[in-house]
Amino acid sequence: AQTVTQSQPEMSVQEAETVTLSCTYDTSENNYYLFWYKQPPSRQMILVIRQEAYKQQNATENRFSVNFQKAAKSFSLKISDSQLGDTAMYFCAFMKLRSGETSGSRLTFGEGTQLTVNP
Amino acid sequence: DGGITQSPKYLFRKEGQNVTLSCEQNLNHDAMYWYRQDPGQGLRLIYYSQIVNDFQKGDIAEGYSVSREKKESFPLTVTSAQKNPTAFYLCASIDWLSGANVLTFGAGSRLTVL
């Protein structure tokens, strides 16, 4: 079974600064996806960024980027130029690639990191 | 607009009562999922369904039941056998055919047992 660990329950950052959220995972799979989702106070889950394990290049989405270290099973999220609207709970998630009609695929989530951006 | 609709948004239940949470999607997604969220524990998978008339247990299925009679609907019943049902419940779906492999979530349902 896969496990996802986020070791930072809470973090804070000043507006316009950079912050990095940590995530490690444990799996014996070779082909999989990794995700970061954010959950603002509205509690709506929003995809932040996605990384395919077979891609060596780190994914980026505007101010959000990841540092994917496959051998170390590490997947950290960097938020640059933090904005007040980035305040949210951030979840790291793992999904192995779908492997057949009956097994299906599922997302396994970490415990989350509550990020607060201060003015 | 396409999306996932969960209802009700808030639900109160007395102990010993069953309650059903609705999840409807108009995204034409094949797979649907139910997650439970508790403070400090992230999201835990209750049940998931890859196709109509088929579903599998997740990590915490005890005390819950589901059905998948239509592609667009995946209701979750919280039974009286669930010992601690107060939680936030999230429904999600995924489109395997597009290759994006991204889970889309509904807005959630908050269940409180009185």
Image (cartoon, coloured by chain):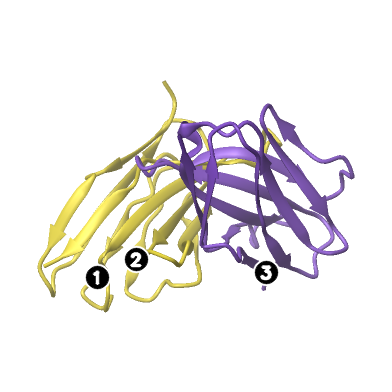
Q: What chain is colored yellow?
A: B
Viewer-proximal residue among A72 and B7? A72
Relative to B99, is B88 on the left or the right?
left
Report if the CB atoms under discs 2 and 1 are less than 8 Å apart: yes
Q: Position of residue B94 (x, y in %)?
A: 56, 42
In this rendering, the answer to whether B36 lies above or below A42 is: below
| Callout 3 crowding tier (Cα within 10 Å): few <14, some 14–19, many ≥20 | some
Q: What chain is colored purple?
A: A
Cα–Cα span, label 1 and label 3? 28 Å
Q: Quadrant of residue A47?
A: top right
Report if the CB atoms under discs 1 and 3 are less than 8 Å apart: no
Quadrant where the C terminus of chain B sits is bottom left
Residue A2, label in figure: 3
Q: Which residue is mark 2?
A: B65
In this rendering, the answer to whether A81 lies above or below B52 is: above
- Give SS at disc 1: loop
Residue type at mark 2: give it: Ser
Cα–Cα span, label 2 and label 1? 8 Å
Q: Quadrant of residue B46?
A: bottom left
Viewer-proximal residue among A10 and A39? A10
Q: Which residue is mark 1?
A: B79
Relative to A96, is A6 on the left or the right?
left
Q: Residue at x 37, y 57 (%)?
A: B67
